[in-house]
Amino acid sequence: MSLPDLVIRGGTLVTASDRFQADLAVTDGKITQIASRIEGGHEEIDASGLLVLPGGVDAHVHLAQEQGDGTVMADDFASGTRSAVAGGNTTVLPFALQRKGQSLREAVRDYHAQAEGQSWCDVSFHMIITDPTPQVLGQELPALVREGYTSFKVFMTYDDMVLNDAELLDVFDVARRENALVMVHAEGHDAIKYMTRKLEEQGKTAPYYHAEAHAQIAEREATHRAISHAQLVDVPIVIVHVSGRDPMEQIQWARARGLQVFAETCPQYVAMTAEDLKGLNMDFEGAKYVCSPPPRDSDSQAAIWQGLRDGTFDIFSSDHCPFYFDGENGTGKDNPRARTSFKWVPNGIPGVETRLPILFSEGVSKGRITLERFVALTSTNPAKLYGMYPQKGALIIGADADITLWDANRRAPVRQVDLHHGADYTPYEGMEITGWPVRTILGGRTVFAAGTFTEAAPTGRYLPRGYSPKQL
């Protein structure tokens, strides 16, 4: 009998439902054996004292996304996926953004061109629909769903992305008919515009006031409206980047009535509050924390942790949306127009590399969630929700050998100088972390270990997907 390509020995394997001591063997990029003792392998890794987890699946990242206003996104596929791998992720799902007036098919084709040969981990694309023309709804979107692009995002705010209620209902109807999954950015556009105007009239233009303009009330209202539309059409939806108690209660209300509403939250809502947007005495440093929805208050943090424990949240994603702070020639957050009002500060923060360590440290290490729940939120559930399970998100025979080894006792602060993203800052600078990924294995090959990339070139693949959210 031939030896396996790789044997990982002596670690504690952790799944979404169990943990146990075992060896794990890999051949041709797949997990082929799990046993108390496996004899011999062409390569052997001693995982004694380490946790052996399925690689992270980050289901919400923005890479190489066109902004349209001169602002430059800080990560392309090369830098963004390197950062993902360094943070223990083996699969990411970024967005192919349709510009107004653009063919959806063209948007997907352009995004593939940017990703080709550049990805250090496996990738699959969501689509962003901003222009639901009859051509898009009647031909392009159904065809793309059938080709494996089985999820797409819609926005209820932002001038260049917002869909009105009639458009949302039309898009939801296509999703129901074609068996696709809709992700919803739920913030009330008109309420935000109203609050922004009122704040600017009062001279309240510092970055902090972004949090007041994007009030939790607007998120709550939009969440309920999105749920109502989904109920009317009878289609499952995902409410993404839920920030606090009010929108959570709408999701719980829907589930109590048997509706298929899935929920995602992110590191910024457990590790930051709106107070961070004040910077140093309401200065422009607060722009480093501007994202939408914004971080809320300590009550919202407590609610998010409860939701992570009790199943209100199905997945924990980064919403990695990286911009430079300084940038060049006015391309970063600190640009002349942004200095005039919070409404011009690019919305988004980097986080793909710090997503897993933050949840591990704040959740597992501090006893707020179990290891099994950590695996479910960060790997197994996103793989199931977006049609990649059991190929991804699992430590079972036949699954891709995407594996992350963790040192649960390693302590170190988050430091920009140690990170691999393209942004010139991290909003989590100095945050003390207990529990870090120490080796990332993609398809049975170590791609990152001990702070070093071990592959000479990117080897990530593109993954077409099915769709079956009832697996959750």
Image: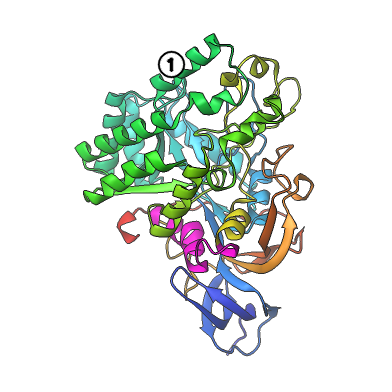
| 164 with respect to 77 (left or right) | left
The verdict on residue 17 being magenta is no
Q: Quadrant of the N terminus?
A: bottom right
Q: Nearer the viewer, residue 115 or 316?
A: 316
The image shows residue 304 at horizontal and vertical percentages of: 46, 49
Q: How many marks?
A: 1
Label 1 environment density (alpha carbons within 10 Å; few <14, some 14–19, many ≥20)? few
Assign the C terminus to one quadrant of the image.
bottom left
Which picture quadrant has residue 343?
top right
Residue 439 is left or right of residue 472, and the answer is: right
- Residue 63 found in image quarter: top right
Q: Bounds of the magenta span?
A: 364-385
Residue 256: percent from the left, percent from the top? Answer: 24, 50
- Residue 265 visible in rendering: yes
What residue is rendered at 60% in x and 86% in y? 2
| Residue closest to the far top | 201
- Judged left or right of residue 444, residue 256 is left
Q: Quadrant of residue 131?
A: top left
Q: Is residue 200 above or below residue 122?
A: above
Depth check, front residue: 276 or 79: 276
Magenta region, mostly helix, strand or loop?
helix
Nearer to the camera, 246 or 21: 246
| Image coloring type | rainbow
Q: Which is more toward the observer, 197 or 357?
A: 197
Q: Which residue is mark 1?
A: 194
Identify the element where label 1 is drawn: helix
| Residue 10 position within the rendered picture, expressed as x and y whole percent measured from the top left | 64, 83
The residue positioned 63% from the left and 90% from the top of the image is 39
Say whether residue 392 is visible: no
Amino acid under disc 1: Tyr
